[in-house]
Amino acid sequence: MYQPSAEELKSIEAWFAEYDALADRGAIEELADLAVFPMNLATDVPGGHAAVRQWTREEYIEAMKEAMGGGTAGLDLESTRTPRFISENLVVVETEATMTIEGQRQRMHYADLLVRTEDGWAFQTMVQGGWGHGWPAAKRG
């Protein structure tokens, strides 16, 4: 089992600090610069089954514009992230987050796969339940 160094753990924290700052500002194009495309997504269809798809950079940007609007700065977002290194180049980061929307606190639980590239860490897979409204259910084979 791979044991990350303190420096590797700090590099993940620094990557998310950059990501969070960009998300606060609604800097969607810059967020896309932190990803590897095509990006894998895994979610589920409420009341149904899992749903998966891949996004191009353009699809990611469009979806994030809808989801983030002008940014996340006003959402009082609090996140606790737990990185789980698969190897020195692959890390699954599990996030427990709480945000406030129109006075209502909402909890989220999701995971991202980060991959080490020549330019540093990049996210490549996003996993979160409940995004699959209108998506076809995943099929085996």
Image (cartoon, rainbow, N blue to C red):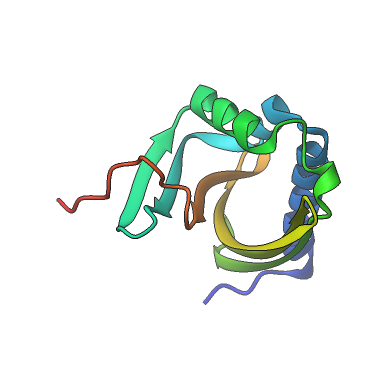
Q: Quadrant of residue 48?
A: bottom left
**Measured along the vertical axis of the image, is residue 76 above or below residue 22?**
below
Of all residues shown, which one is farthest toward the bottom? Answer: 1
In-image side of 48 versus 27 (left or right) = left
Of all residues shown, which one is farthest toward the left? Answer: 141
Residue at 53% of width from left, 26% of height from top?
A: 57
Residue at 80% of width from left, 52% of height from top?
A: 14
In-image side of 106 versus 7 (left or right) = left
Q: Nearer the viewer, residue 103 or 29?
A: 103
In-image side of 49 versus 96 (left or right) = left
Coordinates of residue 65 in the picture (x, y in percent): 64, 29
Residue at 28% of width from left, 42% of height from top?
A: 136
Q: Nearer the viewer, residue 118 or 15?
A: 15
Of all residues shown, which one is farthest toward the top? Answer: 58
Q: Quadrant of residue 69?
A: top right
Coordinates of residue 24 in the picture (x, y in percent): 81, 40
Coordinates of residue 64 in the picture (x, y in percent): 61, 34
